[in-house]
Amino acid sequence: KFLKYRLWGQLNSTLLEDRVDYFGLGRYRLEHWIGSHPSIQPCELHRQNVTFAQMITEDITPAHYEWGMGPRRNEVVDEFPEARERIKEDEDAQFREYFFLPGNLLKWFTLYGSEGVPTQSSWAWKFFPGGDKWKKLVSRYGENAVEEMAMQSSHGFHSAYASNGDEREEFQIDNEDEKFFSDSISPLVVFHHISIPGDKKLSALHALKAQLDVLSMGQYDIISRTYHPQRRVILYYTIAGDTSDIGFFTKICEAKSKHLTCRKLGELSSAKANGETLHHLHNFCLAKPSLSVTYLSNTLPGTYGVNKTEAYSMQKIRAYTTAVTSKMCLKSRETCNVCGAEFYPLPFNHFIGNTFTASCDYVKELLPPKKFETAMNNAAGDTLVSQLRRAVTTELFPFTPQNLGLDQYSVEHWIGSHPDFEPCDVAPVRHSWFPLFTGGSYLPNDYTSSRAYDFMWSHAPRRSTAPAGRLSRKREKEAMEKDDIVFREYYYLAGNLFRWFKLYNKAPPWNSWVWQWYPKGNEWMLGAKKHGSNVVTELSKPFWDEGVPF
């Protein structure tokens, strides 16, 4: 839990470096055992003025002994002196320091539950900085105090879901819609997540209008370069946020009722609940596994830690919507189960814009979105511990909540999370004439140009490994040349196989694209055949380095 809170910026660990012995992992857990309960009442024999250095390097005489209750000294072995000086006058930093109370409370609560709550008279409240503040939080929230502090002090992370209902509730289909599903030409079934944040209301509404224009015109045909309404569109939508000016949406639905049927799934007060529509999409596929579904959102995902955003870029939203509803994406193919504008395997399997058309036969095998969020949070915790043990590397990208699929970012990972995932895409591939100057062999598509609609269907991946500007070719090439990285790199097969077994308890089929695309794919495939769910440990363990200097 701490490592996830640190990733979100809610807790820190500045006094000591990241080492497995300091966190009590692996063979070092027994060193933490005797002092692991909050009821401990420590006592010691050395006088208060005896330092750790003296205990190790100098002769200790009887004069140095005097029994007394501990703790007697503030210094820590191997501590960074400058770090203690730096937070000495910073009460908030002391309050969030793992090696003070937050880390101890997390361990006590995790190991002992409600019995891990220290008594009101515990020495820990007086000894550790920030004790009074933590004492009040624990008195109010008990064993959930640290989680509550993290949630209250940040708006950065939150669940993608507004409720905790039954993930597998039956999807209610209108009788009129059932008739459309029986037609010889199946309808275009669209699940549209509409987010209207109060501070970006006008931009969000313009983006929504652009998508409705595309849906009402029909499906894009590359030969004629026009839209043809060959399929009826059944639009299931959820509105999250400010819905006061959404009247034009209903008017468009009514005006285009010949080809467009709109069904509202619900309204949510918070624009942050960005996963609810996927929840409905999944339930629909459980009910109609022979159909396909299209997912749209009027908000494009950004990049964590990057302030620049194109969340409501009209040109891109229109292009992505056109791509996933085009005849190329809608055509049924046995060799592709999810189609989008541009697919990238790094830093995780995703389609640009997080818009896609997928076969329900594939979607029904995915974890329910709400359960998936929980599973990804748990998997991320294990991954962060593995990083601490230096069992995984992050040479290509840093660990961020988005790259790990934590909390609200799980919605971007969901559609590409299954080992049976077979992607394809339709956006044109632009090659660079001068890769040394442009940073790679491919150029990003210019969606302000009509040439961006020169769609050409193909199996994916077929372009750069990550979206433009996210990863330098030089850096990736250096990583691929080192076995100690290739067999530990989280963003290659080490991380993917870990998640596939963790989430779905299986590896991809032996004819999957992953074994040809990722470095050392053949070795990983043979390892998966031999070791099953233990493949990551077996192949990466020879390169582990726990970083403990003894």
Image: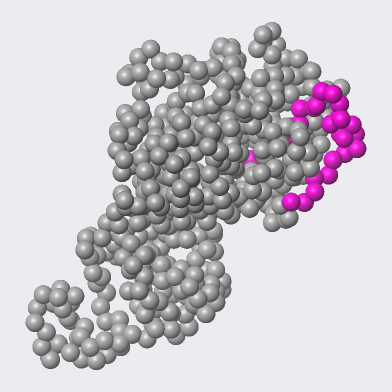
> Eyeballing the image, is 501 above or below 522?
below
Left or right: 337, with 236 as reference point: left
Left or right: 372, with 176 as reference point: left
| Span of residues in magenta | 168-197
The residue lying at 56 percent from left, 11 percent from top is: 451
Image x and y of residue 84, in percent: 27, 64
Can I make out residue 76 in this image? yes
The residue lying at 41 percent from left, 71 percent from top is: 104
Image quadrant assignment for residue 102: bottom left
Residue, far left: 59
Image x and y of residue 151, in percent: 54, 58
The residue lying at 75 percent from left, 38 percent from top is: 289
Image x and y of residue 130, in percent: 40, 70
Image x and y of residue 475, in percent: 32, 32
Residue, far front: 530
Quadrant where the C terminus sits is bottom left
> Eyeballing the image, is 217 above or below 423?
above
Confirm whether the magenta stretch covers residue 7.
no
In front here: 299 or 507? Answer: 507
Query: Number of callouts in the render?
Result: 0
